[in-house]
Image: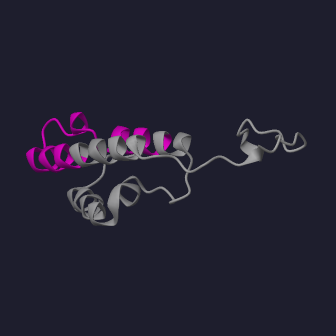
């Protein structure tokens, strides 16, 4: 995949207004593994090292990388929704708890 153009970098930067998930391009119900994959793919594509001779794209990529890092940290620190029994919540559906 080719590195993004300056216009594409600016369009990606504009996604900051959509919040952390919007910037990383993940669904609100995305599991943590999908968030990690989306972050890694974005960083690989927009890393400033991809633009060693283009000062404008390097600067835009640096700004976008910083925004992506903040978005990723925000999502990693966010509380996770409760897990269902199907996801292994630790509560066995056939064992009744004694009533107090």
Residue 60 coordinates in the image, percent (x, y):
16, 50
Residue furthest front as drawn:
100
Name the colour scheme.
Answer: one colour
Q: Is residue 18 left or right of residue 30?
A: left
Residue range highlighted in magenta: 37-64
Residue 56 coordinates in the image, percent (x, y):
10, 50
Q: Is residue 10 above or below residue 67?
A: below
Q: Is residue 92 left or right of residue 56?
A: right
Residue 48 lies within the magenta run: yes
Q: Residue at x 27, y 66 (%)?
A: 17
Quarter occupied by residue 20 = bottom left
Q: 79 or 26: nearer the eye?
A: 79
> Which quarter of the rendering shows the C terminus?
top right
Q: Is residue 44 above or below residue 15?
A: above
Q: Is residue 58 left or right of residue 39?
A: left
Residue 54 coordinates in the image, percent (x, y):
13, 44
Residue furthest right as drawn:
94
Q: Is residue 19 above or below residue 92?
A: below
Residue furthest left as drawn:
55
> Which quarter of the rendering shows the N terminus?
top left
Quarter occupied by residue 10 = bottom left
Q: Main secondary structure of the magenta part?
A: helix
Q: How many marks?
A: 0
Q: Residue at x 88, y 39 (%)?
A: 95
Q: 2 or 99: nearer the eye?
A: 99
Residue 55 lies within the magenta run: yes
Q: 10 or 18: nearer the eye?
A: 18
Residue 77 coordinates in the image, percent (x, y):
38, 41
Q: Residue at x 60, y 49 (%)?
A: 82
Q: 14 or 20: nearer the eye?
A: 20
């Amino acid at each position: 995949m080719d590195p993004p153009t300056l216009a594409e970098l600016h369009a990606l930067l504009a996604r900051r207004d959509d919040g952390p998930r919007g910037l990383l391009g993940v669904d609100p119900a995305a599991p943590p593994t999908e968030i990690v994959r989306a972050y890694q793919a974005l960083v690989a594509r927009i890393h400033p090292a991809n633009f060693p001779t283009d000062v404008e794209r390097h600067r835009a990529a640096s700004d976008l990388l910083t925004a992506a890092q903040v978005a990723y940290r925000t999502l990693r620190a966010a509380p996770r929704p409760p897990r269902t029994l199907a996801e292994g919540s630790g509560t066995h559906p056939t064992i009744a708890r004694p009533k107090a």
